[in-house]
Image: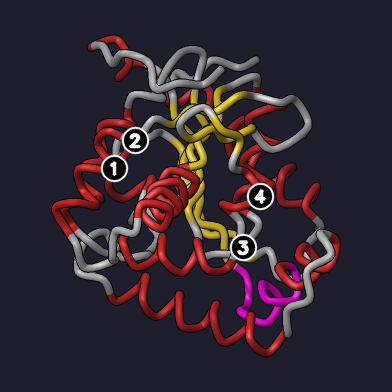
Amino acid sequence: MMTAPDASGTSLQVPVLTIDGPSGSGKGTVSRAVAERLGWHFLDSGALYRAAALAARRRGIPSDAVQELAALARDLDICFVERPGDEPEVRVDGEDVGDELRTEQVGALASAIAALPEVRAALVDRQRDFRQPPGLVADGRDMGTVIFPDAPVKVFLTASAAARAERRHKQLKQKGLDVKLADLLQEIESRDARDAARTVAPLRPAADAIVIDSTGLPVEAVVDRVLAIVASAVTAAGMPAR
């Protein structure tokens, strides 16, 4: 079970691979696969924001109630249960909320509250506490720029908005949900603009990140490329090979 463990001074010795990128770039799927291949822990930072958004929605807290949202983020009862070969189970207040977290409504609210400096500050330490041996693969939007700026390997995974909308549309159809592709594309483009324009931790590659465009690439090809990047950094950065 991946709860947020106690941080310690030795945590800074633990290697971190950050994989940032916009919604639908495939970073979650790739990050999970890479973490499993390396035998490292996995942090889905977006799930923390989505969980906070879901909890706020359930409690009727509006998106402009900054202090209430920050307090909610600090005190939120959330944990991840690892499931090899699948997404971690996300529990909020002891309840599995995985399906609800992936709805478009929760995603839009998560993007809105993620732009609030107070909410981001409330979740910084919780994310850093996941840095535990033997290593961590951190998936998000500011993992390499804000949360783990000292990570020895940073990847920024992107893809065209059209490709990302098509991927999301396929995922939703497989779950039996009927969503228009045009609506998804509009939402993705709006979210990209919002994430890039926010004043706190805007979506952008870290200066030392390796950018990978996954448009047209199968997942396994991207996973192999990321693993090759990690392998090339093992000796130079002192990262433990599995």
Q: Establish if 12 lies above or below 156.
A: above
**Residue type, label 1:** Ala
Q: Establish if 233 lies above or below 9.
A: below
**Residue type, label 3:** Ser
Residue drawn at x 37%, y 64% is 204
x, y (%) of residue 137?
Answer: 52, 33
Magenta span has 83?
A: no
The numbered mark at residue 94 is none
Q: Which residues are the magenta region? A: 159-167
* Disc 2 and disc 1 in contact, CB within 8 angstroms: yes
Disc 1 from disc 3: Cα separation = 26 Å
The residue wearing badge 3 is 25
Looking at the image, is mark 4 or mark 1 earlier in the sequence?
1
The residue wearing badge 1 is 73
Residue drawn at x 59%, y 59% is 212
Magenta span has 163?
A: yes
Badge 2 marks a residue whose secondary structure is loop
Looking at the image, is mark 2 or mark 3 earlier in the sequence?
3
Nearer the viewer's eye, disc 4 or disc 3? 4
Structural crowding at the residue carrying mark 1, measured as other residues with C-alpha within 10 Å and reported as few (<14), some (14–19) or many (≥20): many
The numbered mark at residue 76 is 2
Disc 4 from disc 1: Cα separation = 20 Å
Structural crowding at the residue carrying mark 3, measured as other residues with C-alpha within 10 Å and reported as few (<14), some (14–19) or many (≥20): many
